[in-house]
Amino acid sequence: MPHFNSELFRHEVINIVGQIPRGRVLTYGQIARLAGYPLHARHVGNALHGLSDEAIPCHRVVNSAGRLAPNWPEQRQLLESEGVLFKPNGNVNLKQAQWEITAFSEP
């Protein structure tokens, strides 16, 4: 695994999240693996925190159980507006909404 570079990691995370299609989600862990740092799932949230660019669909990132970000009630509304289904427990239905990545492009 390469040496952790937080700026490079942040750039990779933003690139990956920017490619998640409408109506699909990825988990923090999937994004960390795609960025080349499989043990850095918690850093994904830090990389996205406070991001003000509305072109980056941060609302499409959930945890491995499909739970939404705490203290962000709009996230569910944004996902529902894209057709994402939720389980009775309030988690995203990952079987329906998880993005199955077949190809990943670099900017």
Image (cartoon, helix red, strand yellow):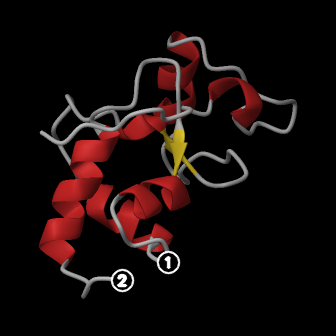
Q: Quadrant of the C terminus?
A: top left
Q: Is residue 37 above or below residue 93?
A: below
Give the quadrant of residue 9. bottom left
Q: CA distance from mark 1 to mark 2?
A: 10 Å
User: In terms of secondary structure, where does tag 1 sit?
Assistant: loop
Q: Is residue 74 above or below residue 49?
A: above
Residue that appears at 62% across and 20% down: 84
Which quadrant would the N terminus be assigned to in this image? bottom left
Crowding near the residue tagged with mark 2, few <14, some 14–19, many ≥20 C-alpha atoms within 10 Å = few
Q: Report the side of 94 relative to 72 (left or right).
A: right
Q: Is residue 92 above or below residue 72?
A: above
Q: Residue at x 44, y 75 (%)?
A: 40
Residue 88 lies in what quarter of the image? top right
Q: Amino acid at mark 1?
A: Leu
- Residue 72 position in % (x across, y down): 48, 44
Circle 2 sits on which residue?
A: 1
What residue is shown with label 1? 39
Give the left or right position of residue 12, taking residue 35 as reference.
Answer: left
